[in-house]
Amino acid sequence: MNTNRLALFAALAIGAIALLIVALWPGASPEPIAAVPLPTPPPATGAPEAPRARRPIVLSTPSEKPTPPAGGDTPAWENQIDRVLESNVSEAQTAQILLNMLPTLPEDGQVEAANHVTNLLPDENYSAAKPVLLNPGLAESVLSVFFTDLMNRSDQIKLRSFIEIAKIPNHPFHDEALEDLEIYLGENYGTDWTKWSSATEKYLKEADAQ
């Protein structure tokens, strides 16, 4: 065997022995290599931002105010009435202003104003509404508001107003006024207004005495 081959075998044997020692000797194990964190790549240019949190969806509550007529804004008369109602005056003064406005309003506006007047006008100021109540030229829808309101008034206002209405032959509520008088007084005096008035005052006097 030549010298080179012997040297090769010797080197292989020494390497094998070294590997065996490393494998079997406890302290000979090489120390673990610490993990090196990989660098975070920079964000790509023009990349989309992270999505933002969604806002909670709030369902809108339907408005209580009536929708304006289709094809137009709120009627001018409605704004006029609103301005009067928002003015810094007493209820009786507000009612008087609305009464003064009635001739300038269309029928829908008159009905609206009449409803506010009857709600605001106290008994002690009811005389302000009499010219309207006794005007047969007004629309029946407007007079109906005032006539119906009489049922919520004192007997003095109610019964005396019934007599005044019944005296107007062409008043839309002429017949109803006579019928209501007959119900309260228990008599029918036809067109004898003196007897109607006397019976009414007697009724009121007896009611006060109770």
Image (spheres, rainbow, N blue to C red):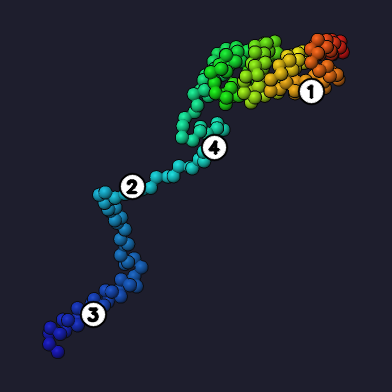
Q: Residue at x 12, y 84 (%)?
A: 3
In this rendering, the label closer to the viewer, 1 or 4 = 1
Residue beneath label 2, please? 49
Residue 53: image location, x then y, percent? 42, 45
Residue 154: image location, x then y, percent? 76, 15
Q: Residue at x 86, y 20 (%)?
A: 186
C-alpha gap between disc 1 and disc 4? 47 Å
The crowding category of the residue bearing disc 2, from other C-alpha atoms within 10 Å (few below 14, some 14 to 19, many at least 20), is: few
Q: Amino acid at mark 2?
A: Glu
C-alpha gap between disc 4 and disc 3? 92 Å
C-alpha gap between disc 4 and disc 2? 34 Å
Residue beneath label 4, please? 61
Q: State which tag comes first along the sequence, 1 or 4.
A: 4
Q: Label 1's element?
A: helix
Front in this rendered view, residue 167 or 144: 167
In this rendering, the label closer to the viewer, 4 or 2 = 4
Q: Quadrant of residue 137?
A: top right
Q: State which tag comes first along the sequence, 3 or 1.
A: 3
Q: State which tag comes first along the sequence, 4 or 3.
A: 3
Q: Label 4's element?
A: loop
